[in-house]
Amino acid sequence: MLNGDGLRVVLWVAGCSHGCKECQNPITWDPQSGLEFTDAERKEIFTELDKSYMSGITFSGGDPLHPANVAGVTALAKEIRAKYPEKTIWLYTGSLWEEIQDMEVVQYLDVCVDGEFEIDKKELHLKWKGSSNQRVIDVPASLRQGKAVLHQD
């Protein structure tokens, strides 16, 4: 429930080039670390998403938009959007919305939390993000308006 709205499936990916100071998950920076994502893991995600009480999926890491991840995350997000149009898809990235808004994966997202974690801007009361520079973005509204629109909870 800390990785987006409601009860969620979370896929943590390996590979991140941002290297944020005091990152909560530096073990995920190396794209060669972690476990291989196989058909068994894919099936497990879909089994969990089949449950009516699951709100959706969150892609986190590492960085789902790292070059080692973006193709696989895009394909999986596209498949999930087609199979579960009522479920929400969230994605956390150290990149800024303005840098990623034209990527294919964005069209399948509901919410994107953007920006690098900055330890000097860390605030414990923030919802769904670790530092005040990060934004929780309503992706469909942002695509319609052509600018980052903040998600309203």
Image (tube, helix red, strand yellow):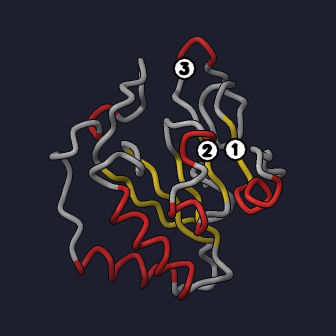
In the figure, 40 relative to 25: above or below? below
Q: CA distance from mark 2 to mark 3?
A: 14 Å
- First in sequence: mark 1 or mark 3? 3
| Number of residues whose C-alpha sits closer than 10 Å to that of mark 1, classed few (under 14), some (14–19) or many (20 or more) | many
Q: Are marks 1 and 2 in contact (CB under 8 Å)?
A: yes
Q: Name the image quarter holding residue 15.
A: top left
- First in sequence: mark 2 or mark 3? 2
Location of mark 3 (residue): 118
The three-letter code of the residue at mark 3 reads Glu
In the figure, 54 relative to 4: above or below? below
User: Residue 59: x and y, percent?
Assistant: 47, 57
The three-letter code of the residue at mark 2 reads Val
Location of mark 1 (residue): 136
The three-letter code of the residue at mark 1 reads Val
Q: Secondary structure at mark 1?
A: strand
Location of mark 2 (residue): 113
